[in-house]
Amino acid sequence: MSDSLHLEVADFEHDVLTGIYSEETGKPQPLRFAITARLKPLPRYEPETSLDASKNYMDLKFAASDALPEGVHFKLIEAVTVKIVKLAIAEAGERIGITLHRERRG
């Protein structure tokens, strides 16, 4: 079994034009994202390992923000691994949404 390293951003909220049903389209709706990026880990992290060898969590958050341009309607939202919770349709704090995992091709 090989080691794996996951960089995560959870509970990231952003207004997005999305959906296929009439009650969803035409206005941005708040979505809550949990994003996980699987990274290739170093063989071993030693106490002297340079900070340059680490990954910046904020880079993942900013990449997610930049990937969601204003004014663009997404019928379906896709990424490597994304969990989306539709906040506007929850009635009692439940989490209604999807988790998508797609392997990179090529």
Image: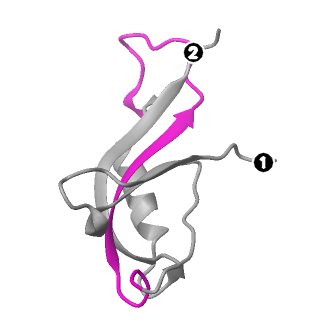
Quarter holding residue 48? top left
Q: Nearer the viewer, residue 41 or 38?
A: 38
Q: Is residue 22 left or right of residue 2?
A: left
Does any portion of residue 56 appear in the rendered image? Answer: no
Q: Nearer the viewer, residue 90 or 78?
A: 90
What is the crowding at mark 2: few (fewer than 14 residues within 10 Å), some, or many (at least 20)?
few
Residue under numbered circle 2: 3
Position of 38 relative to 65 (above/below):
above
Is residue 41 found inside the magenta-colored segment of the image?
A: yes
Q: Residue at the location (56% across, 75% down)?
A: 75
Q: Give coordinates of residue 19: x percent, y percent.
A: 48, 76
Dot label at residue 84: none
Position of 6 relative to 30 (above/below):
above
**Residue type highlighted by circle 1:** Arg
Q: Give coordinates of residue 94: x percent, y percent.
A: 26, 50
Q: Give coordinates of residue 44: x percent, y percent.
A: 51, 11
Q: Give coordinates of residue 8: x percent, y percent.
A: 39, 39
Disc 2 to disc 1, how far (Cα)? 21 Å
Q: In the rendered structure, which segment of residues is drawn in magenta?
A: 23-52
Q: Is residue 14 left or right of residue 101?
A: left
Q: Residue at the location (41% across, 80% down)?
A: 24
**Residue type highlighted by circle 2:** Asp
Does any portion of residue 93 appear in the rendered image? Answer: yes
Residue under numbered circle 1: 105
Position of 57 relative to 23 (above/below):
above
N-terminal-most mark, 2 or 1: 2
Please tell me whether mark 2 sits on a helix, a strand or a loop: loop
